[in-house]
Amino acid sequence: MKAKKPCISIKSLAKKFPESAQRLELFDSILKTAYSVGFKHQDKLSPETVRSLLQAGTPLLDTASFDENAFAGVFSRLLKQFHKNNPEEFSTVIPANVPQGLFTAHLDADADKMTDFSEALSMSTATLVSCCQQAARPQLDAFAQINSEANTGLWSESCCPFCGALPAMALVESSGARRLFCPNCLSDYRFSRHYCPACGHGGLNVLQMDAWPGLLIESCPECRLYLKTWSSGDGEPPCPFPWFDIVTYAVDEAAELQGLKRMSLSVMGV
Ligand SMILES: [Zn+2]
Ligand SMILES: [Zn+2]
């Protein structure tokens, strides 16, 4: 099976956000490569399994089995693509074989194993994690879509109910409810408004962005991590997630200058 690639007119987005045109095109070419590879059929989880996992606060991913060969296929294609497009910056030697266990180590966010793999592949851990994020996405995305009914009020954790990642962005609806967006499987889910998803601290610092009316940097005084948050009181966001994460890249640069760090990787893995 294949996952449906997230679609939008990149041409019109690039016209609207010319400073992000290159990044938008790169992201689209990554998605095209990643979503072109088929993988083994995934079964929908039973309602009982979903209910018991969500009630226990366990992301559904823990019971899923993914196609490691398909992941390896996407991973190699992406490395070749990055190398071809930008041989100077992306000088990593393309491995003949993607090492066994890389997909699982990535899904488990096993830092020690990822460091070992990055040494074996002669690439930085950050680059490796980023490539794995892009290569794993189609299967995680499909898994979240197949089990989308699981996105119910049963879940009260701050990480993604499907894949367990911390959010990349947030949106506060006009009702005051907050939705968080996952950079890995691209799904969204509800979480309480005033708590830090990373450490649970109550009470966030809010910074308004002059260049982006409606977009807030909500940062945690405890762990210093932040989320770019669209406040719907100002209408619909100028473009949907995941592309919104890309076109607001300059906001991340501004936040970093203030000594703040993103809560998770961006959708582009940086
Ligand atoms: Zn997710
Ligand atoms: Zn925090």
Image (spheres, rainbow, N blue to C red):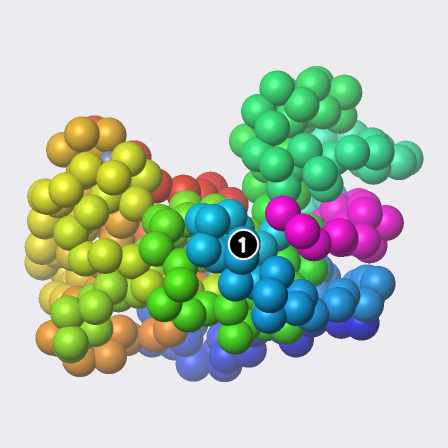
Which residue type carries mark 1? Leu
Q: What x and y, as percent, mark residue 216?
A: 16, 56
Q: Secondary structure at mark 1?
A: helix
Residue pushed farthest right? 96
Residue at 53 percent across and 57 percent down: it is 52
Q: Quadrant of residue 236?
A: bottom left
Residue 103 placement: quadrant: top right
66 in the magenta segment: yes
The reply to whether residue 7 is in sight is yes
Q: Which one is nearer the viewer's eye here, 196 or 27?
A: 196
Q: Position of residue 240 (x, y in %)?
A: 38, 73
Q: Please tell me which residue lies in front, 27 or 147.
A: 147
The residue indicated by pointer 1 is 53
In screen coordinates, is 165 left or right of 68?
Answer: left
> On the picture, is 261 further left or further right than 232?
right
In this view, 96 is above or below 10 = above
Image quarter for ligand 2: top left
Q: How dense is the environment of label 1, judged by Cα within 10 Å: few (below 14), some, or many (20 and up)?
A: many
Q: 203 left or right of 4?
A: left
Q: Would you say the magenta stretch is mainly helix, strand or loop? A: helix
Q: Which residues are magenta?
A: 62-78
